[in-house]
């Protein structure tokens, strides 16, 4: 189940709520009882190098995941 991050505008507490995607935009109450909250924009880091996904070497060509530039092959 996705986890969404919220911040309370009254006490500035940041908290997370697990809920289905269908309820992603539903309001959430602060754990301290306040109702003036805002959903924060979350970012996901998947790793890899800057500028996009690594180039894959052709089958049987060796060189690892990025053609050998990272030394993984």
Image: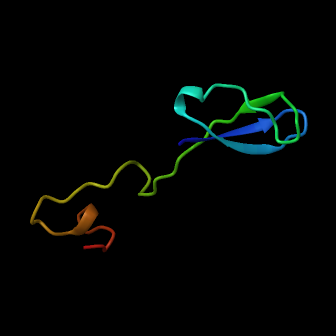
Q: Residue at x 86, y 40 (%)?
A: 12
Q: Is residue 55 above or below residue 62?
A: above
Near-viewer residue (66 or 10):
10
Answer with left or right where residue 44 lies relative to residue 4.
left
The colour scheme used here is rainbow
Q: Residue 64 falls in which quadrant of the image? A: bottom left
Outermost residue, left side: 60
Near-viewer residue (48 or 17):
17
- x and y percent of residue 5 in the render? 68, 41
Answer with left or right where residue 14 lies relative to residue 22.
right
Q: Residue at x 27, y 63 (%)?
A: 65
- x and y percent of residue 35 in the render? 84, 28
Q: Residue 72 falls in which quadrant of the image? A: bottom left
- x and y percent of residue 46 in the render? 46, 53
Q: Is residue 65 above or below residue 33?
A: below
Quadrant that contains the C terminus: bottom left
Near-viewer residue (7 or 49):
7
Q: Residue at x 79, y 30 (%)?
A: 37
Q: Is residue 29 above or below residue 32?
A: above
Q: How many marks?
A: 0
Answer with left or right where residue 31 lies relative to residue 69.
right
- x and y percent of residue 59 in the render? 11, 61
Answer with left or right where residue 67 lies relative to residue 36.
left
């Amino acid at each position: 189940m996705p986890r969404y991050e919220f911040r309370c505008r009254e006490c500035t507490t940041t908290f997370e709520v697990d809920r289905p995607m269908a309820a992603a935009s539903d309001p959430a109450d602060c754990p301290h009882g306040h109702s003036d909250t805002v959903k924060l924009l979350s970012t996901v880091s998947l790793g890899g190098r800057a500028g996009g996904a690594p180039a894959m070497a052709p089958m049987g060509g060796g060189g690892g995941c990025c053609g050998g530039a990272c030394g993984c092959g």
